[in-house]
Image: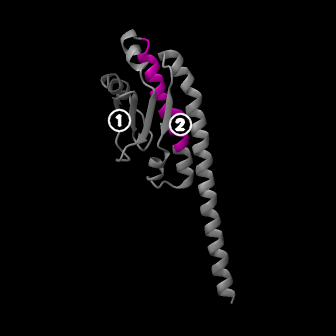
Amino acid sequence: MKLLTLVVALGLTVANAGMMDKIKIKKAVAAGESKVQAEVASVKSACGNKSLSVKVDWDKWNSYKLDVSKHENTLNYVSQVIVNEIFTTMKDACKDADYKGVIAQVNKIAITGKDNFSDMYMDFSYDKGTLHVKVNGDGYGSWKNKELFMKSW
């Protein structure tokens, strides 16, 4: 009977820890979304976009199966550093009138992680109003990202 009680208690503890991990991840995603959305206005102002929405595929980062503390840090890094790098690159490009005219037509930015966790550079492509960005899974940026962004137009 004591063994059964111990097994049940252990099972409840593990289940509770799993639920707490999910809550922490949900909170990190919500905070990340908030940070991303706060930056949209600055891009719209710099580039003249009439409407602009950003969709981050947070589930892609879930697929890397990081432990929760790393996962929270990765979500924060994605929302603060990687997305900011994309927005800063867009705003810098909009200082050039030719780029600004094209970038102003972007009405959606779709950001996802790359399939290969350690792939270094961002991939940019533009299709019918949507800028698609694939970010390296480990969150490290590169000087080459700006060059790749500029080539996507």
Disc marking residue 79: 2
Most distant residue in the top direction: 97
**Amino acid under disc 1:** Tyr
Q: Residue 84: x, y in percent?
A: 50, 29
Q: Cα distance, mark 1 to mark 2?
A: 17 Å
Disc marking residue 121: 1
The residue located at (56%, 27%) in the rendering is 39
Q: Nearer the viewer, mark 1 or mark 2?
A: 2
- Say left or right for 10 vs 88: right
**Magenta-drawn segment:** 75-95
Choose between 55 and 118: the one closer to the eye.
55
The residue located at (35%, 47%) in the rendering is 115
Mark 1, other Cα within 10 Å: few <14 / some 14–19 / many ≥20: many
Most distant residue in the bottom direction: 1
Q: Residue 83: x, y in percent?
A: 49, 32
Do the residues under discs 1 and 2 have CB atoms within 8 angstroms? Answer: no
Q: Quadrant of residue 90?
A: top left
